[in-house]
Image (cartoon, grey):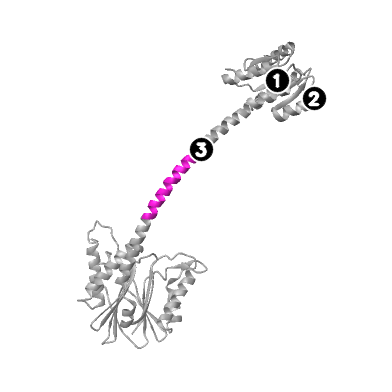
């Protein structure tokens, strides 16, 4: 059904002329309806609304028998708020025009006799404005519907995200609880402070990167021998902690029958390779550990040292001496057929020994964001070694924090300082 333009005037000749001109403008785009009074126009409007026919424009005279033009336009606007109106009249006071403007969506006032071109342009503009408003209204309805759908979708997705978040949080809490319990187990395997202090005069700076650590320290006393270890296992966190507990277990077993430092490392390497099935050529498992091992003979006052990558530092008479380790790890390696070597040291009064992993010297920080390096580590040891051991630990820790700043710790750290 075509949209309708409604023309209202009490003079038939005016309606005939209007209808003819509108036909010339719009051809068959619109149906042109006419009414000779306001009451007749209202009947037509009611029928159009009942039939669902659009009527973009009403062109109405003002002075008519019965209902005036402005009264008609006000009533029509109350029934179809989108419909525009043109008042085409020879007589209209300012009050009538004001009522039409304020209460009837009056598009324009044109006086009789009208200019044909002016009327054509006004009618075209009015109908175009109607369709634009109609399009915007339809788009707004679609947008509103889409937004409602989007809100429902967001609400649904939010509920799903909250649900998944709750599941993830529960799993994370379970995992964290397990890791924290693993920390208790790992801590129980490490030498207890009071027992350790009864064996040797020492300090231990032990800083896991995560909750559990791949670095470990270990001390055992058998007969007149004291065994001291600082080790750095492959990885950190949970994987490193598994390897550290494996290493502690093996060491506890080995030292029951073997006291020589090089032989302890040879046996330890063999056990790691066999336990992790690294002897199988197809297995690409290189997990293992770097380690410093010292065996102190209390009767002879000698210390035997062997190392897998990790050295031993001794400060004697204000001089720092580095005893290098063998350049091979406790794991499958191209040199795993070679035997570890040992160094024997006659311990003198006031000798102080340091064993450590590489976490401290590899830490990035400082003003140029560089590694601390072994050079910096040796420098700080020479500055602090005359302090008591507890104070040395404090100074090493403070230096580390100052160097690291806001940077993340990159690896586990263990440093042991001891003297006899």
Q: Is residue 193 above or below residue 117?
A: below
Q: Position of residue 159 (x, y in %)?
A: 43, 46
Q: Which residue is mark 2?
A: 93
Q: Which residue is mark 1?
A: 59
Within 10 Å of disc 3 (Cα), the crowding (few <14, some 14-19, many 20+) is few
Magenta: main secondary structure equals helix
Q: Is residue 131 above or below residue 366?
A: above
Helix, strand or loop at mark 3: helix
* Circle 2/circle 3 CB separation < 8 Å: no
Q: Which residues are magenta?
A: 147-170
Q: What's the distance in space between the residues labelled 1 and 3, CA to CA?
A: 39 Å
Within 10 Å of disc 2 (Cα), the crowding (few <14, some 14-19, many 20+) is few
Q: Where is the C terminus found, in terms of image quarters?
A: bottom left
Q: Nearer the viewer, mark 2 or mark 3?
A: 2
Q: Position of residue 219 (x, y in %)?
A: 29, 77
Helix, strand or loop at mark 2: loop
Residue plotted at (72% across, 13% down)? 17
| Residue at the front extreme of this rendering | 66
Q: Which residue is mark 3?
A: 148
């Amino acid at each position: 059904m075509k949209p309708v333009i409604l023309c209202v005037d009490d003079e038939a000749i005016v309606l005939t002329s209007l209808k003819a001109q509108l036909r010339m403008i719009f051809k068959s785009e619109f149906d042109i309806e006419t009414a000779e009074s306001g009451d007749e126009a209202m009947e037509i409007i009611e029928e159009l609304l009942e039939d669902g026919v659009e009527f973009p424009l009403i062109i109405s005279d003002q002075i008519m028998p019965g209902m005036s033009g402005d009264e008609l336009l006000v009533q029509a606007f109350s029934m179809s708020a989108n419909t525009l109106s043109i008042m085409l009249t020879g007589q209209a006071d300012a009050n009538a025009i004001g009522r039409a403007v304020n209460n009837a969506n009056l598009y324009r006032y044109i006086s009789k006799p009208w200019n044909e071109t002016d009327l054509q342009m006004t009618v075209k503009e009015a109908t175009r404005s109607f369709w634009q408003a109609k399009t915007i209204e339809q788009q707004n309805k679609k947008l509103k519907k889409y937004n409602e759908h989007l809100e429902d979708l967001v609400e649904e997705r939010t509920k799903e995200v909250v649900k998944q978040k709750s599941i993830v949080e529960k799993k994370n809490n379970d995992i964290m609880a397990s890791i924290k319990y693993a920390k208790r187990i790992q801590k129980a395997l490490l030498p207890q402070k009071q027992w350790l202090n009864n064996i040797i005069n020492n300090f231990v700076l032990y800083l896991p990167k995560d909750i559990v650590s791949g670095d470990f320290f270990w001390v055992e006393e058998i007969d007149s021998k004291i065994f001291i270890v600082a080790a750095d296992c492959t990885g950190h966190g949970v994987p490193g902690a598994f390897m550290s507990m494996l290493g502690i277990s093996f060491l506890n077993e080995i030292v029951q029958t073997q006291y020589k430092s090089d032989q302890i490392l040879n046996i330890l390497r063999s056990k790691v390779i066999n336990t992790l099935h690294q002897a199988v050529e197809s297995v690409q498992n290189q997990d293992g550990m770097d380690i410093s091992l010292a065996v102190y003979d209390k009767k002879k006052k000698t210390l035997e040292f062997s190392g897998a990558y990790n050295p031993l530092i001794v400060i004697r008479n204000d001089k720092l001496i580095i005893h290098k380790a063998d350049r091979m790890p406790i794991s499958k390696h191209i040199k795993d057929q070679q035997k570890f070597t040992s160094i024997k040291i006659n311990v003198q009064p006031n000798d102080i020994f340091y064993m450590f992993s590489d976490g401290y010297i590899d830490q990035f920080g400082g003003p140029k964001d560089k590694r601390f390096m072994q050079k910096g580590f040796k420098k700080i040891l020479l500055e602090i070694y005359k302090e008591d051991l507890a104070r040395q630990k404090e100074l090493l820790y403070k230096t580390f924090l100052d160097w690291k700043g806001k940077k993340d710790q990159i690896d586990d750290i263990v440093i042991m300082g001891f003297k006899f």
